[in-house]
Image (cartoon, coloured by chain):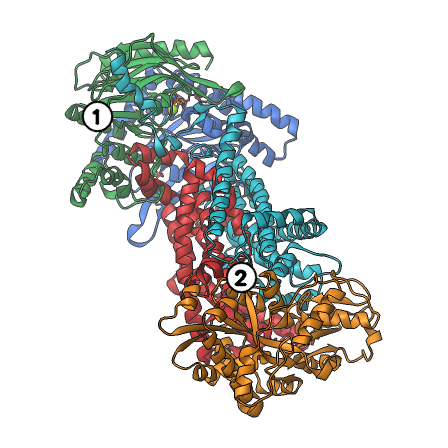
Chain colours: A orange, B cyan, C green, D red, E blue
């Protein structure tokens, strides 16, 4: 209940509760928090409270129950949050990152055809990477089933476990996001497919920024300032990569007790692109793919995006806007 | 000294022995019929259930939370109904139940041996005694890497996690039971010629049985919880499981399905508890400690 | 249930049983432990109960103490009276010391600490265990445990005392001493005592009246007053004579059952 | 009948009472010095530890697995050393320990009340008795959505999960203990004037204490495991915690750190077990059931 | 430890104690329960042990049974002999029926099922509990429990029988009957019996020799043979005379301690 109170109370400073993951794909969020960019942009009228999550579901639950106002999150939970609330609960107000996903396999596998009969891991049944793998294989004429059967055996498992199982030889490859791509490569894997190559302009969404509809309605100004912060954070990340990488490492260290190796961040960095465009088309296409591989029912994404704030901010800075789908 | 004195004195056997005290007296005189006994055992459950669902529905009606965050009973039971009609529930349940039984059996075997050893052998107790609780506190996910190292992506990896979760609990039950075996009975056993293994068989094991059953019950809870986590470890080809479905429901932010699965888990828990309850009641009847209290 | 019989009257220290029946278990396994036992114990009376092993003496005391429900009949131990029962087994609390055990009834009656301590010491002296206050029950011998239980029961200060073979595990000398103590307390406090014993001489030594219970079902089959003036000596000829008579009766009764 | 007969008969008190039997006899005669008793309690632990580490090192030396999958003791202890010197361990430990204590205390309070109620009130037992084990089997993650619904992203949400995890276990311990209180002691208590609450205070609670302590021990394990899971629910205000560190160590595939954290968890478990062990030993000494067996 | 005294000899049924000392506890709380008790019981001898409450009788039996370790001295109950001990408390296994309890020693000796069943029935008849085989201990009266314990001990078939107040909870008649039974079994099987009782007449009725233990520390202070020919009757004048003498001694002893 206190969530709604905070969100609807016009008197006094507004509290914005922002969620993100301590992760490379959430670089703008991490850097923005660590460097005080959000606090700066939100100004004195909006109090920033940050919450760190380990995975999407908890963040969605938090948004649903009014415990969180905005969060950086992957495309998959975004769609879930939107569709399970019948299009009511959330809006995407900005993009954050693109790319950073690849199929890493054992070095002896050199062609897609050789994947037949192999075990390939994905982070989670029905998530973006899982769908991408299944669709990719389908295009190549290889079948998969939800239960892990078919020409290629898809094993959904946590990314951390994938590193263990790949190392021990229990799986032959994995379609995973950064930093796990780099990790698997360091563990002797080889990138067979870089997912960017499958998309137009080599762009597809990996992280975007969502805001709860209630908060958006109650405090559009605060949301605009948040988007300003996001744009500024991306600016920072893109212009000062070294400082950003160090900031990410430090920030992760604060939360997890051990700074992430900067070398690993540097290794993963080039595969990612930090863009304010949420690349709505890729989300839509991804969903079509999911329907094609029979992992979901079609979902109407109308109204998911509200990019007016982003475009306002970009326009004010004299930058090109993004297309509102 | 006729009926009016009766009125003042008769209460001794009825009204005076009331409230909690009444529960403390063997209520055998209230030799109820079979039907009324079943009714007495059933209505509180039904009432509790009705109360819980009513409360839930009331909260939903207040509109306190959005329906996608807190779905109402109607939505959940509709989803549960679909779920019950789907093959995935029954397949998942079959897989999970089999794993639970096998894993728990292994855990019980390990736990019993470990518990008996630690309880009766001084050196083992000094060496491992305190390790058991420590192991018990280790979360399942900490064992996952080791499980994969040892067993790759096989069901054995799941069993490994289940056994590590449940065996310490069983062992602790055994140790507690053995520790509190009345010394007089141990002496009596030794005196009637039960030494070594026979002492365990004829005296220590039966005397510790109540505590062992309690330990098994706690062990089952650990086993089941570890299994729910462990089933995510290995999603074995062609096999769905309750643990995996639970996590997927959450991953998809599917609140009604999540609650439907929770109901299924509760029902399984109730069935298992009924089995343990029957065992415990049989023991208490034998020992003559039944009917002290409510049941 | 007993509208045909007269109903018991209530008076402090008086115990009245009317047609008391007790059945253990149900159906085939049912055991009729007591069958229509009617008994009036006057305030301040000392009644000894004798009978063969398993005839229902403990059952009777449990019922009078209100620890079990009668299957039929009525028991009246006086309004608001909680008869003190000394169990056949010592029934000490293993988690308390000897002192702690004796102190429980005093604590429950809300006595202040200093007074409790004094009473405990006095009671332990009465049962000749003054030096054993800090021991735990498992460190005592069988007879010592029985004496602690006696002290605990005496600490209750109730007008009605029910005693189930209280001196069974004691040597003759200690028993003699405790007979004197019990008699003293009984006459000082004007207690009503219902006393179970297998020692017929003990019964004759202590009782105003001796009651003999038959076996399965337990019924009162014989009752005799002991008119020997107090103080009595357990080895006096009058006591011996009464004991011999009761023994004879008992022998007939037990013989009848082949027990 | 001199010394040679002595040789054949003397063994009765020594050699003949050997092996397990010897353990079953109170060994008070072996009144050892303080130092030797500490040594007797310590060397098996040290030996077990040395054995475990030796085995581990041996496996690492065989090169069975790559060193990043299974790091050797040297690597892990080096990492542990760094970890011990870092602020993050101590901050995390402080946060987690505080949460564990608060959560466990709440769970104990809830568990005791629930357990006593169910154990002695017939209607409650019929209504809730079997629900307790069922609740206990519910994995923590199933409660997360509800926790967030009720308590938002606060520490209370974590406590909620911890209490739901641990309270049933404590309650089951209480129920078991109360169920097996010897009827004779209950009668004795009632007869000395303990009715209602006093009966609990003076008789039932102390008589059930051993089983309650056993239940608390199992409850602690549940609480700690639930906490490890619950701490992942949300990281509040950038506060690090052992649970978060454990998961992130795994997420980052940092095997040495994961093992270092496991060692920390084991040590915490050992310390807590020592506290429970001391309590249990004190009770057993009082009850006179100590020294039957090894310890 | 006892190189200065002669060492006990071993022979089936013989029990020999040499300077047996038993200390409970340590340091300040140490209790010297037995102090240098030396005793030879010949094969087939029936020895009764009497003494004040808490003087160490149960302790002595426990030591002879090998259930506790001596603090000093030596005990020899014969090579490979496991003396059967009937405890002061009934010590029945609550999870077994009466039959089950009596059957345990037979099972442990590996007797075949049919024979076991026969023996159990016979033993229960001996203690007059033939109808109670399917009951559980908590459904029995105190005296019945004691009799079941007796049957269980007899089922052991050992040459040495140690009995700790075996008939304490029995009425005089049942006790008389069991005296006869015990005497019969003792003479048939040529048992060596060490029998603790508080009933001096019982001691005189049964014993070849009566031994009197002093209190704290427990020492043998008096020993007398009972030369009355068997069969004896507990109420015969010879028995009474011996009992009176032992009682006198006991009285002096207990009086000396103010117990
Ligand atoms: N809880 C019980 N359940 C079933 N039967 C019982 C129970 N308690 C006692 N009985 C039976 O009731 C009868 C009387 O028992 P009770 O204990 O009153 O005898 P008693 O006169 O005290 O004997 P004793 O002198 O041996 O102590 C016995 O036959 C006994 O088997
Ligand atoms: N486990 C124990 N720990 C400490 N002291 C004990 C223990 N067992 C017995 N004692 C003490 O040893 C002494 C002798 O006890 P024991 O039980 O042998 O007496 P007893 O002769 O059998 O007495 P009773 O006739 O009352 O049964 C007593 O003073 C008792 O307090
Ligand atoms: Mg009785
Ligand atoms: Mg004794």
- Ligand 2 within 8 Å, label 2 CB: no
Residue occupying the point 41% across, 20% down: C53
Which of the labelled discs sits on residue A271, or is there none?
none
Could you tell me if residue D263 is visible in this image? no
Secondary structure at numbered mark 2: helix
Q: Position of residue A171 (x, y in %)?
A: 74, 70
Q: Is residue D40 above or below residue A313?
A: above
Would residue A195 be seen by someone viewing this image from the given angle? yes
Residue C180 found in image quarter = top left
Residue C40 lies left or right of residue A180; in this view the side is: left
Out of D58 and A220, give the one closest to the viewer: A220
Compared across the picture, whether B10 is left or right of D165 comes to left
- Quadrant where the image shows the C terminus of chain D: bottom left
Residue A233 relative to residue E215: left or right? right
Q: Disc 2: which chain?
A: B
User: How far separated are the C-alphas under marks 2 and 1?
Assistant: 57 Å
In this rendered view, identify the residue nearer to me: A120 or C220: A120
Question: Does B24 appear above or below D163?
Answer: above
- Asked which secondary structure carries label 1, the reply is loop
Q: Position of residue D112 (x, y in %)?
A: 40, 48
In this rendering, position of residue E174 left or right of residue B250: left
**Residue wearing tag 2:** B135
- The answer to whether D20 is drawn above or below residue B30 in the figure is below
Q: Position of residue E209 (x, y in %)?
A: 39, 28
* Residue ID for mark 1: C159
């Amino acid at each position: 209940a206190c969530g709604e109170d905070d969100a609807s109370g016009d008197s006094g400073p507004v509290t914005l509760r922002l969620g993100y993951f301590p992760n490379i794909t959430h670089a703008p969020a991490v850097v923005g928090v660590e460097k005080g960019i959000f606090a700066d942009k939100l100004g004195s009228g909006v109090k920033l409270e940050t919450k760190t999550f380990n995975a999407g579901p908890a963040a969605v639950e938090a948004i649903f129950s009014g415990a969180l106002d905005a969060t950086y999150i992957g495309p998959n939970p975004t769609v879930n949050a939107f569709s399970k609330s019948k299009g009511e609960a959330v809006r995407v107000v900005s993009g954050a990152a693109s790319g950073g996903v690849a199929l890493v396999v054992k070095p002896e596998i050199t062609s897609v055809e050789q994947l037949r009969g192999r075990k390939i891991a994905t982070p989670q049944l029905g998530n973006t990477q899982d769908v991408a793998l299944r669709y990719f294989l389908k295009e190549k004429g290889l079948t998969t089933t939800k239960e892990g059967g078919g020409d290629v055996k898809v094993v959904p498992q946590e990314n951390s476990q994938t590193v263990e199982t790949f190392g021990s030889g229990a799986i032959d490859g994995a379609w995973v996001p950064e930093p796990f791509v780099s990790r698997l490569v360091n563990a002797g894997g080889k990138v067979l497919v870089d997912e960017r190559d499958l998309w137009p302009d080599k762009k597809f969404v990996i992280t975007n920024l969502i805001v709860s509809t209630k908060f958006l309605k109650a405090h559009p100004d605060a949301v605009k300032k948040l988007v300003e912060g996001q744009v500024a954070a991306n600016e920072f990340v893109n212009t000062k990569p070294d400082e950003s990488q160090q900031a990410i490492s430090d920030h992760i260290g604060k939360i997890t007790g051990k700074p992430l190796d900067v070398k690993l961040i540097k290794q993963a960095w080039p595969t990612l692109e930090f863009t304010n465009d949420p690349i709505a088309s890729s989300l839509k296409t991804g969903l079509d793919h999911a329907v094609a591989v029979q992992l979901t029912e079609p979902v109407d994404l109308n109204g998911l995006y509200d990019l007016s704030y982003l475009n306002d901010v970009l326009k004010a800075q004299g930058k090109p806007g993004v297309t509102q789908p | 000294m006729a009926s009016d004195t009766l009125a003042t004195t008769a209460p001794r056997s009825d009204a005076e022995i009331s409230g909690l005290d009444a529960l403390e007296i063997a209520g055998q005189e209230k030799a109820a019929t079979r039907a009324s006994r079943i009714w007495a055992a059933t209505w509180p459950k039904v009432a509790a259930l009705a109360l819980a669902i009513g409360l839930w529905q009331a909260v939903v009606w207040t509109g306190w939370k959005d329906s996608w965050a807190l779905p109402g009973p109607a939505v959940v039971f509709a989803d549960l109904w679909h779920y019950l009609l789907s093959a995935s529930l029954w397949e998942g349940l079959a897989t999970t139940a089999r794993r639970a039984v096998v894993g728990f059996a292994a855990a019980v075997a390990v736990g019993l041996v470990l518990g008996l050893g630690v309880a009766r052998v001084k050196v083992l107790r000094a060496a491992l005694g305190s390790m058991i609780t420590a192991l018990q506190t280790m979360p399942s996910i900490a064992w996952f890497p080791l499980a994969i190292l040892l067993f790759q992506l096989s069901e054995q990896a799941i069993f490994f996690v289940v056994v590590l979760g449940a065996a310490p609990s069983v062992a602790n039950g055994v140790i507690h039971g053995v520790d509190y075996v009345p010394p007089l009975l141990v002496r009596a056993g030794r005196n009637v010629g039960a030494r070594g293994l026979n002492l365990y068989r004829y005296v220590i094991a039966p005397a510790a049985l109540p505590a062992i059953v309690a330990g098994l019950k706690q062990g089952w809870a650990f086993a089941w919880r570890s299994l729910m986590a462990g089933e995510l470890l290995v999603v074995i080809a062609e096999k769905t499981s309750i643990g995996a479905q639970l996590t997927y429901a959450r991953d998809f932010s599917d609140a009604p399905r999540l609650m439907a699965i929770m109901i299924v888990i509760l029902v399984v828990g109730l069935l298992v508890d009924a089995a343990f309850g029957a065992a415990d009641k049989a023991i208490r009847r034998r020992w003559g400690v039944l009917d002290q209290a409510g049941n | 249930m007993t509208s045909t019989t007269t109903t018991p009257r209530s008076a402090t220290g008086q115990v009245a049983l009317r047609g008391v029946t007790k059945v253990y278990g149900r159906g085939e396994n049912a055991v009729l432990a007591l069958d229509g036992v009617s008994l009036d114990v006057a305030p301040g009376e000392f009644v000894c109960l004798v009978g063969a092993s398993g005839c229902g003496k403990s059952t009777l005391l449990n019922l009078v103490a209100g620890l079990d429900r009668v299957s039929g009949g009525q028991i009246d131990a006086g309004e608001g009276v909680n008869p003190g029962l000394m169990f056949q087994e010592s029934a000490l609390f293993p988690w308390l010391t000897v002192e702690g055990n004796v102190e429980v009834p005093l604590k429950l009656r809300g006595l202040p600490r200093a007074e409790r301590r004094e009473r405990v010491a006095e009671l332990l002296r009465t049962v000749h265990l003054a030096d054993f206050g800090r021991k735990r029950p498992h460190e005592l011998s069988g007879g010592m445990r029985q004496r602690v239980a006696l002290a605990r029961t005496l600490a209750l200060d109730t007008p009605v005392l029910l005693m189930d073979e209280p001196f069974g595990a004691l040597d003759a000398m200690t028993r003699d001493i405790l007979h004197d103590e019990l008699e003293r307390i009984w006459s000082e406090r004007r207690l009503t005592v219902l006393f179970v014993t297998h020692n017929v001489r003990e019964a004759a030594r202590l009782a105003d009246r001796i009651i003999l219970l038959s076996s399965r079902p337990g019924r009162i089959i014989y009752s005799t007053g002991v008119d020997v003036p107090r103080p009595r000596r357990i080895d006096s000829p009058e006591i011996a004579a009464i004991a011999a008579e009761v023994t004879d009766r008992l022998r007939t009764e037990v013989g009848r059952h082949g027990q």
